[in-house]
Structures are given as structure tokens and as C-alpha cells.
Amino acid sequence: MQAFVGKLSAFRYGFPTSLNMRRTVTYQFRSHALVTDITGNIPGWCRDRLAYGQAERIDIKEGTIISQYYSHFLFFIEVIDVDLQTDLIADYTVLETSLFLFMMQEGKIAFEVPGVGRVAGASGNTCYATYNSRGEFTYRLPAGRHRFYYIVPRTGWVAKNIGHFPRLEPFLERMQKADDLFGHMPACRIDEGMHVRLGKLFGLREGKGNDLESLMLRDVKRIIVYYHQLLDAMLGQRPYLIRSYIEENYADPLLGNRMLMEVFHVSESTLIGIFRNEFGTTPNTYLISFRMQRAKILLAEGKISATEVAHLVGYGNFRSFSIQFKKLYGFPPSQCC
């Protein structure tokens, strides 16, 4: 049993070796954390069992966290169950730029970058590919039960098998350039097919004639391929094509409803209607929000002036940029630095 206080990492497992993929994430809690090894003795309120994994119970002021994890030489997997009496704000450090397949089964979570604010979130039955560059991040969980998993595949292995999931190729290239602190692909609903694949992965056991690590690698690959299939089906729908176009071309000062109408051959009412039905907002509002989020990140880095940032996110007129920024965040761009 080990006790950790304040900013000390609650996870110093010591199990990675040259044969295993090293853990790329450590967690920090803002209150005293008591960590107990419970391998083979998972509480009954945890719905999933990682049959071949190690497990730890973390007791903190806000509640209890159960972590089950396994380090394969080509991936790292962690299953986390959380039971909170009060809201939790905690931090994590990414030790090296890493690709994640994140799956939220129950509850909800929000991710933040210090100095920037919320950058992503997830609710029950959603999954998405994401990456974080090396650095410190924050997450928030409301009181209640939460259950989520993540798989961190070795980047070289993903690149070698990119033919099985081509939609991840440009995403992987963007990650390797390391220009951004984070990035994420669209979230897909976790359906019965994904549940079945996760169940097979978690339930694997060593047996006579079984190569457990080969079986795990097979099932992890199947899960990533299945996410790619879900992503492929979703991104083929017009609202997602429009959103992707906005995200790829947000720096173009001419981007707006008129351009989108011409590119996608729709009327303005159809454009707004199909986008709002899927995302709960209009294309123009989404464009402004996306531009401001990108601007806030660039301003927080402090490497270029606010005028240059305005130009990089599609504003030829700095005054217009400044008005939109203050309207959204409540303070002018000059204060973001």
C-alpha cells in the first residue's frame, strides 16, 4: 500500500520493461491519494474485468477510482471505474506525444488545457481517436459513476498497419508534426459490435496452446478497425462532411455559408437545417467557435502577436476578430497571453 499527496503521481507502477510499451500518462490528484494493489480482487460495482491485467484502488477525498491496466509491447490499455461523492478536478501529464483510442462507456468527462480551457469532452457510449502532445492537462468528472477505457497503440505499429485504417493517416501525420497540443477525430457511438469486441479483449485468458499477447494484439487491431468502420460510415454523411470542411478550411477568410452552399450544392436553409439537426448549432456559429478556440491556443502559446493570430484563423480585420473573441470569452485577445 502506498500513499501519495498533492502533485505526486498516483501511478508509479514500475512494471514497464524494455519488452513492454512504457506508460505515457501519469495522474496527479489535488488531495491526498491512497493507492492499494487489488489485482485479482476487483469490486463488484466494476462491470468490466481485465482478466490478465493488474489493478489498483485509489481513494481520494472526492471518492474512489479503480484502475485496471496492461502493458503489451505494442500497446497499453487501461480500464477505469470512478465512483465520486463530489465533483473531481484532477491533472495528468503526457510524457510523450501519443495516440489514444478513448472510449467513454458511462458518465461524462471534460478535458482542459491550462490557460486555454475546455478542449474536448465525452459522454456515455462514445469513442474517438485523439492525441496529446507532451505536456500537462486537466480533466473534470461530475459526482456519480463513470466508466471509460483507453488504448495507446505504439505509433510505429499504427503507421505500419495504416492500410487497415486510412482515415487515421492524415491524423497520424498531423500528430507527428507536433504543431498542436492535442487533436481528435469525430466521436462515434459505441454500438453492440464494439461492445462485443471489447468483451473479447477483456476476457482473454492464458491457456494451453494460447499465445495471449498475440491474441490481445489481434483483438486490439480489430477494435481499431471497427472504430474506423464506424468513423467511415459517419463521415460519409453530409453534416460531417460540412463540419470537416469547416475544420480544414477555417483559415480561409472567404469561408462562410455562401462558400459551403457552393461546395455542397445545397440551399442556405438546407445547409443550416441539416447541420443544426446533427450538431445543435449553425455552420457559421460553429466556424466562429472553432476559429476562436484555435486563436486562444495560439495566443496562450505567446509566440506570435494577436494581429498575426487573427490572420491565421481567417480574420482580415483585427477589430472583428477582437469583438468575436471578447464576446465568446469575456476578455480581449491581449489578456489571453
Image (tube, grey):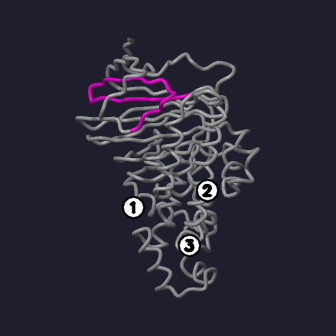
- Label 2 sits on residue: 228
Residue at 48% across, 84% down:
270
Task: Work out which quarter of the rendered image holds the N terminus and state it.
Answer: top left
Badge 2 crowding class, 10 Å Cα cut-off, few under 14, some 14 to 19, many 20 or more, is many
Residue 20 versus residue 237: which sits nearer the camera? 20
Q: Position of residue 325 (x, y in %)?
A: 45, 58
Q: Is residue 232 above or below residue 50?
A: below
- Label 3 sits on residue: 237
Instruction: Name the mark nearer the viewer: 1 or 3.
Output: 3
Q: Amino acid at mark 2?
A: His
Q: Is residue 62 magenta?
A: yes
Residue at 49% across, 37% down:
203
Q: Amino acid at mark 1?
A: Lys
Q: Position of residue 231 (x, y in %)?
A: 57, 60
Callout 3: SS: loop
Q: Is residue 299 above or below residue 151?
A: below
- Label 1 sits on residue: 327
Residue at 27% across, 30% down:
62
What span is colored magenta in the figure?
48-70
